[in-house]
Image (cartoon, grey):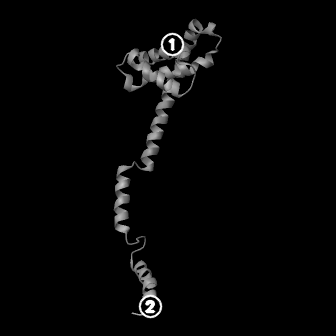
């Protein structure tokens, strides 16, 4: 075979094979399609992720609404326990809310404060909402109120 003929075949063969394959496949189409299908089976779909986000958002909103409905308790507790701290209620509010949400959390349904506190502290510190030692008692009171409400 002449060198020019070999060069033409090298150029023509990939072109012919690309034309003869079904649209959307490149010779590895079946393997790629199978791998894509397997990944789709493993990963939740976009719609499934969106539904989870909506459910989580609805749960957060419900917890927030419940917190607001009982906020007078937290304000009373603040007045009785933290007024002399020179911090305003709005600075303690996140601590009460954090504890309250933990009290409503099903993971801590049957737990006592001693077993909840490490997680409460970790999530508080990760959120950098202030010194744990300053807000610990407010978080605990919020947790107690959430637990009491859930048990009703």
- Name the residue: 40% across, 48% down: 44
Q: Is residue 39 found left or right of 7 in the rendered image?
A: left
For the residues carrying marks 2 and 1, which lies nearer the camera in this image?
A: 2
| Image coordinates for residue 120, horizontal then vertical, percent | 46, 22
Q: Nearer the viewer, residue 127 or 24?
A: 127
- 77 w.r.t. 94: above or below: above
- Residue at image mark 1: 137
- 80 w.r.t. 142: above or below: above
| Image coordinates for residue 33, horizontal then vertical, percent | 37, 63
Q: Which mark is residue 150?
A: none
- Name the residue: 55% across, 10% down: 77
- 16 w.r.t. 70: above or below: below
- 8 w.r.t. 83: above or below: below
| Image coordinates for residue 49, horizontal then vertical, percent | 44, 45
Q: Quadrant of residue 107?
A: top left
Q: Nearer the viewer, residue 13 or 29?
A: 13
Judged from the image, the secondary structure of the residue bearing numbered disc 1 is helix
Q: Which mark is residue 3?
A: 2
Q: Residues within 10 Å of mark 2 (few under 14, many from 20)?
A: few
Q: Nearer the viewer, residue 44 or 129?
A: 129
Report the Cα–Cα distance between label 2 and label 1. 87 Å
Q: Assign the C terminus to one quadrant of the image.
A: top left
């Amino acid at each position: 075979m002449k060198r020019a003929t070999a060069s033409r075949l090298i150029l023509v063969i990939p072109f012919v094979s690309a034309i003869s394959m079904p649209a959307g496949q490149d010779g590895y189409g079946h393997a790629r399609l199978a791998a894509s299908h397997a990944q789709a089976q493993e990963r939740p779909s976009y719609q499934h992720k969106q539904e989870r986000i909506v459910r989580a958002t609805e749960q957060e909103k419900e917890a927030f609404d419940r917190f607001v409905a009982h906020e007078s308790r937290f304000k009373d507790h603040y007045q009785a326990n933290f007024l002399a701290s020179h911090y305003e209620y709005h600075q303690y509010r996140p601590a009460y809310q954090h504890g309250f949400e933990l009290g409503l959390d099903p993971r801590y349904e049957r737990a006592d404060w001693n077993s909840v506190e490490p997680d409460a502290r970790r999530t508080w510190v990760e959120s950098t909402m202030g010194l744990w030692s300053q807000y610990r008692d407010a978080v605990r009171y919020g947790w107690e109120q959430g637990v009491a409400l859930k048990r009703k």
